[in-house]
Amino acid sequence: MTSTLRVGGDGTVSGSVVNTGGVAVTDVVVMLEPVAPPLVAQNTAIPVGDLEPGERAAFEYTVAVVPNATAGTRRLSATVEYRSPAGKQVTAPFSLAIPVAQKRDQFSVTPVNATFEVDSSGILVVRLTNEGDTQVTDVTAQLQPVEPLSSADATTFVSRLDAGESATLRFDLDVSDDAIPKTQVATLALSYESATRTARVESQPIPVTVVAGEPQSIPVEAVGLVVVAVVVASVWWYRRR
C-alpha cells in the first residue's frame, strides 16, 4: 500500500488485492468504510473484476486532507466484497494505515520576466507549476500589487493543470515614477478546485525587480540648434552696437 496524502491537499491511496484462495472469485470490489474529516474520499468503491487463484488487481482512492489536519498516520477501515463460485456474497474486512505528510504549497511561482524600470509599464510574466500529486482545475490567478506597483489587467484563468504541469501567466504591470530601485513584492492570489472538487485558495509572493531608468540625454541636433541660436544672437547684438 502507498499513499501520497498531504495536509491541505489531495493525494492517492493505492494498493492491490490478491486472491489467495484456490478457486476463482467474481465481482470483486474494494470498499472504504465511510471516511470523516480530516480525510475526505472522492470514491469509496473500486471494482476490480474477477480474480483467478493467485491473481492480483490494483486499486486506488483519491482522498483530500483538510487544511487544519495534523500530519501522521491515519487508519482506514475497508472491505473486499466478492462472489464465490457458488454465487454467495462474501465480505472480508481489513484496515489501511495511511501516512499523511506535512502541508506543502500546491503551486510554485517562478518569475520569467519581472524586471522593470522606474516610471515604466510592461508585462509581468511568471511560470505557475502544479507541485501536487493530482490534477487541479479552474485555476484563477489574481495579481495583487501594492504601491509603487499597479496593474490594469490583473487576472488570468487556467482551466486545468496536471500534476507537475506548468502554465505561463501574463499580467499588465505599471511602476510609478517615484518608485525606489529595489526588489518589490506583489502577491499572486490563487483559487482552484482540487481533484476531489474541493474549492481551495493559496497565495504566492512574486519578487519584482525595479531598476533605475537610463538618464535622459539631450540630442546632438538640439545642442547644435542651441549653439547656432546663441551665435546668431551674438552677431545681431554685435551689429547693433
Image (spheres, helix red, strand yellow):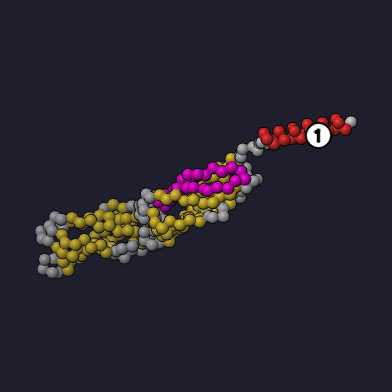
Against 181, is 199 above or below? below
Q: Magenta residues: mostly which secondary structure? A: strand
Which residue is at 15% across, 64% downward? Answer: 26
Identify which residue, 216 or 230, lies in the foreground. 230
**Magenta-drawn segment:** 102-130
Which residue is at 36% across, 59% downward? Answer: 195
- Amino acid on which disc 1 is placed: Ala
Q: Which residue is mark 1?
A: 233
Which residue is at 26% across, 59% downward? Answer: 95
Q: Identify the secondary structure beneath mark 1.
A: helix
Horizontal relation, residue 124 to residue 44: left or right: right
Q: Residue 154 placed where, x, y %?
A: 53, 55
Which residue is at 32% across, 58% downward? Answer: 62
Q: Residue 160 placed where, x, y %?
A: 39, 56
Identify which residue, 84 or 167, lies in the foreground. 167
Q: Give the total of numbered labels.
A: 1
The C terminus appears in which quarter of the rendering?
top right
Identify which residue, 45 or 132, lies in the foreground. 132
Task: Report whether residue 51 is seen.
Answer: yes
Q: Quadrant of residue 88?
A: bottom left
Q: Tell me the crowding category of disc 1: few under 14, some 14 to 19, or many 20 or more residues within 10 angstroms, Cα based.
A: few
| Residue 107 on the magenta segment | yes
Q: Quadrant of residue 235?
A: top right
Q: Residue 178 placed where, x, y %?
A: 65, 45
Horizontal relation, residue 235 to residue 199: left or right: right
